[in-house]
Image (cartoon, rainbow, N blue to C red):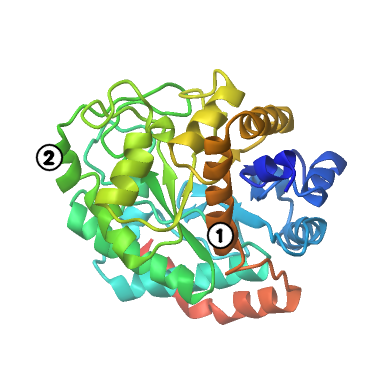
Amino acid sequence: MKSSILAGQLICGGFAGPALGTTFSAALSRGERGGAVIFKRNIESAEGVLELNRSIANAAPSDMPPLIAVDQEGGRVARLKAPLLLVPPMRVLAKQKDPALLRRVARAQGEELAALGFTMNASPVLDVDTNPDNPIIGDRSFSRDPEEAARLALAYADGLRDATLLTCGKHYPGHGDTDKDSHLELPTVSHPKERLMSVELLPFRRAAAHGLDAFMTAHVVYPALDPGVPATQSHVICTELLRGELGFRGVVISDDLEMKAISQDTGNTAVLAIAAGCDLLLVCSDEERQEIALAALAREIDASPTFKARCEEALARGLLMRRKKGPSPDLAAFRNAIAAHDAVRAELGALS
């Protein structure tokens, strides 16, 4: 396999506008992207995003089905609006303390997303809501209690899997106790390892045992685990702890490498993240930065047999996941799903 293809398959990118542009389409066709992540800027209508996802699927090589992901948690993190199911923040759902409700809602949400051609909902949030001053997690979390956060989040994951969607628990190893937004700056969580293991990491341990498809990393420093090194770039956190102590066997996806916590040098950041144990890198909007990451990865692949082997391992793990759920956009199935979810919609309306 060419170095550029091996490198590009480890990048899931974003792009501007509601139609698939020629440069991103060409990169997919060359095998130089592992998939796409869809944002509000790409969405004008449900029918439009279905056709967009179809074009992404058609552009990619048939033996390398693309990941097509969206952040559709509910509440303030929802890229798609009505007629899709309008899911409230997880804090609102979790107050019912009803795993069966969470699973029903997630299955309905997942059926709609799958019919639009998505293969992954970047959900559930596994962060524990321990800091009331947290600017980025808050009501996205299921609970302030780690055991309850795990139990309810995994019920939600089960609903998404009932709908055949891939799941992605985030933000490993826990973003719930930060007081900074990693979109804007690099946070630190300074708790000792004993506390991290019993609170922040407990839902991820449960999720690893439950077989979630993927975890997304946090651009956060945990001095008790690896001083001065953001989790996304830490071999201690992304490999030794995650694969060793927690026993996770799924795909490790970086959070967006464009976030200001970590974005100073996209090429170097990409190489460090893959070397640390990430299997797939998000570069969510800037196609030029995607090319910078690809070039840096390809250079390191050519220079280092050890790094090349790490990339081959990452690709094998990512392809195994992607082949479990290829894109299947279907307008009739989408319309049927919307019509079938009136009862769930009414249930959510009663909660709000």
Sooner in the amino-acid sequence: mark 1 or mark 2:
1
Q: Type of residue at label 2?
A: Glu
The percent position of residue 89, horizontal first and vertical second, equals 39, 53
Q: List the residue tagged with mark 2.
A: 194
Q: List the residue tagged with mark 1.
A: 120
In the image, residue 30 above or below residue 86: above
Task: Say which quarter of the image contains residue 214.
Answer: bottom left
SS at mark 2 in the image: helix
Is 339 in front, or is 77? 77
In the image, residue 133 above or below residue 137: above
The percent position of residue 127, horizontal first and vertical second, equals 31, 46
The percent position of residue 259, horizontal first and vertical second, equals 52, 28
| Residue in view at x 54 percent, y 65 percent | 85
| Residue in view at x 58 percent, y 31 percent | 304
* Residue 94 shows in this picture: no
- Left or right relative to 350: residue 5: right
| Residue in view at x 63 percent, y 42 percent | 11
- Left or right relative to 121: residue 173: left
The percent position of residue 136, horizontal first and vertical second, equals 39, 36
Task: Say which quarter of the image contains residue 83.
Answer: bottom right
Classify the position of the C terminus by image quarter: bottom left
Q: Residue furthest front?
A: 305
